[in-house]
Amino acid sequence: MSAPVTTVRTGTSAARTARFVLGKASGMIIVLLVVSALTYAVFVLLPADPAQLACGRPCTPERLEAARGYMGLDLPSWKQYLLFLGGIFAGRTFGSGATAIDCAAPCLGYSFRLNESVTDLITSRLPVTFSIAIGAAVLWLVVGVAAGVVAAIKRGTVIDRAVMIGAIAGVSAPSYLVGLLGILLFGFTLNMVPVSGYVAFTESPLDWAWHLVLPWTVLAILMAAVYARLTRAQMLDVMGSDFIRTARAKGLTEQRVITRHALRNVMIPVITLFGLDLGGLLGGAVITEKVFSMPGLGALLLDAVGNFDLPVLVGVTLFSAAVIIVANFLVDLVYGVLDPRARA
Amino acid sequence: MSDDLIGGQPLVTVEGLTVQFEGQDRPAVDGVSWTLHRGQVLALVGESGSGKSVTAFSVLGLLPATAEVTGSVRLAPTEGVGEGGGASMQLVGATPAQLLPVRGGVVGLISQEPMNAWNPVLTIGWQIIEAIRVHSKVTRARARERLLELLREVGLADPERIARSYPHQLSGGQLQRALIAMAISADPVALIADEPTTALDVTVQAGILGLLRTLRDTRGTAIVLITHDMGVVADLADDVVVMRAGRIVEQAPVARLFAAPEDAYTRELLDAVPHLGAVASANKTATTKTATTTATSLVSAPTGRVEAVLPPPIDLVDLHVVYPGSRRSAPVHAASGVTLRIERGEMLGLVGESGSGKSTIGQVLAGLVPATSGTVRVCQVDLRTAPRKEQLGVRRRVGVVFQDPASTLNPRWTIAQAIGEPLRLHTDLRGTAARDKVAHLLELVQLSPDLADRFSHELSGGQRQRVSIARAVALDPEVLIADEPTSALDVSVQQRILDVFADLQQRLGFSCLFISHNLAVVERVTGRVAVMHEGRIVEQGPTRDVLGSPQDPYTQRLLAAAPVADPAVQAERRVHWLSLTSG
């Protein structure tokens, strides 16, 4: 049971980790394929004809036919799907000759309405959505967890009650309402922050943050409320467990008991939820972007829905799904770091 | 550390300690006084709710904020604690800052469930090093050396591996040993051991009790032993404090308490302990005392009444149960070639330690776990080949009683609804007829029919378990499976439940598989016993023969490990146990 066993153990544990990551990654690819097939099926089954929308007026049968050929809609749907998949990896070309449009890999489709490839549309809007999502996420995680922990430690006191009432208010407040009220109060009445628009981080980090303060807060209020409640419940649960008593019986200060022993256990379910929420938000915060007139993914999606811009719809949906799946994957990895039982 | 003690002065002096929890009408601890000396093992004995744990935790200042503590808990002066200069320290009303050096530094804690006592996300080594470094400012490297020394001292053979392990990777016994290592890491003068072996198997328990004894002998550590197990008391304690409803009813040296208990409650408690009587006589160790206190088997051997023509209601032939492993773990063979037969009206005890597969057998018979191979015949129906409908029909002829009565009753149902459920599912009894049947069933298990409209949380643990039994026999089953039915109960309650069992069995004549890890309980209620070890039946036969003169080495070890509630006998049994394990 000594040295040789030890070496074997470390060896297998490294191999195990590699197998764990590989297994998760291959599962991820399968899920993405299924999602892409499903979104594409919706694209094909929808009664709207992209060619019709693109063919202009007057739309003679000849022009419509030409447009269909140009967009590849005259092919059988499975072939269209394969072309779509192929475009992601190798890029594709719509039409031919002088009017040909090149869509470089990764090509998620082409919006004939906006005359831009879906990939370009997404990448141009991504910084906006990422800025909103990451900032809000940091804010709600810090505020929510801190509030939950404090409420749990001060259980039954005025502080606890205040946090919980605040959390219920936060959960019940619709973000469009909070957003508009925020614009009214801080934007117009107090004139403290800009009410709309986006400034790139690379242009001016200060302006960037300044423009995002309100959207961050609006998004974070709702989520922080959810996280405060979850954290409080988890914290109460953990603080009542035997190992906390063991830690106290060792002579640790209450502060160390909380930070070194309780928090990590509390964070296990919190991080799981956080990964999913952040992933979902990276796919576009539709309402918030609309309220603050931010040109993000959510706004792009909303616009595409309003105009039957199917290639954009499919592309953005697939991208959002990919982000959520990747977030899930990262959660699994972090979970393994936080909780040794998940590694076993 | 201990040299600083003034000779003869007690380490801990508890005087008139009263603990009142917010919102409760009577104090949890009411005017308790005792002293603890160097090298002494003081057992605090009593049933759940007697206040024994609350008393002990007050020595660590570990009571919740809702507790109002009055009286006095004084700690003899030790290095680094209190005002110094030889003054003793008062723990009642001490500030958190004053208590920190006491916790772990002067008084260590060993708690009940080793599986829950460790932080699941940190390694054993990390947690012990943390404890070391809280109380002495040593380098990380020195703390690590100390860690390995400690793990070796508590008898863990591979300290490097243990230190690297996370709690879920170790067994209950290993975790409890490591927990003891952590508790002694700062050389405390006293240990609080809160039911240190209750969650462990008897053979593991014997090792832990031996370790505590060694610590007492080599380090002079005083131990406050909280337990409900009179066998453990007999094995380890020097003095005993018997508590009931927050008060001390009797306080005596262990030998005198067992030989001549003065208080009526103490006598009641001692009488309630099931003794392994026949075992002691077979081992030829001091038979007289145990023989007199032995409760003779409540159930007579069934052979007289068995109608041999009828096939047995439970017939297992070469049963194998394999739980498939996952990618990372090998399949588990929970049963490997078990052949077992229970005759009509017979009560068979199935004993073994955790993981032996005994519960799996019960679940196979109840149709809850499929057999991998072999024959499973329950009430003449083959559970592996019979049509699904016939298999489900068997379930109404099989009653099941589980270990924890609190979690097997729906908290939102009344007792009448709980007992009435099988009647609603399988009979036409409705309305008053159903109510009458429920009342009759409650009377059968010696409960008042008035309880029918109560909810399970309004009942005591023993009452709840009797409700579970009433529910299990509601349909007058041919077969009853009882999986550790008394393990979660206090010893005096356990006795009553066993009486109810024996009485019902006599009246209703069902065949019963009685699964238990407690040999004395099995001896008390069953006529025949089978011993399970690692998925196999290693020995079976009449209870008296198997427990009296065990043939299989595993059965011998199991029997020798179980402590008996008699200090003199237990001292001899301990020697016997050591000879079995060292060989």
Image (cartoon, helix red, strand yellow):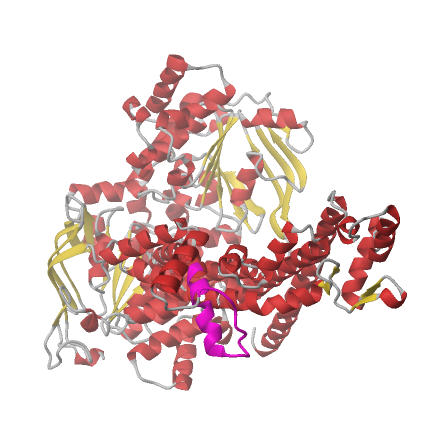
At 47% from the left and 21% from the top, the residue drawn is B424
At 12% from the left and 78% from the top, the residue drawn is B83
**Is A267 left, or right, of B85 in this rendering?**
right
Q: Which quadrant, please, contains the C terminus of chain A? A: bottom right
Q: How many marks?
A: 0
**Is A144 left, or right, of B100 in this rendering?**
right
- In this orientation, which residue lies closer to the viewer: A146 or B203? A146
Relative vertical location of residue B256 with respect to residue B312 in this rendering, above or below: below
The answer to which quarter of the image holds residue A163 is bottom left
Residue A36 makes an appearance in the image? yes
Q: Is residue A200 magenta?
A: yes
Residue B563 makes an appearance in the image? no
Residue A318 is situated, as x and y percent measured from the top left of the image, at: 68, 57
User: Residues in magenta?
Assistant: A195-218
**Is B38 left, or right, of A27 in this rendering?**
left
Residue B317 is situated, as x and y percent measured from the top left of the image, at: 64, 37
Residue A186 is situated, as x and y percent measured from the top left of the image, at: 37, 63
At 56% from the left and 58% from the top, the residue drawn is A280
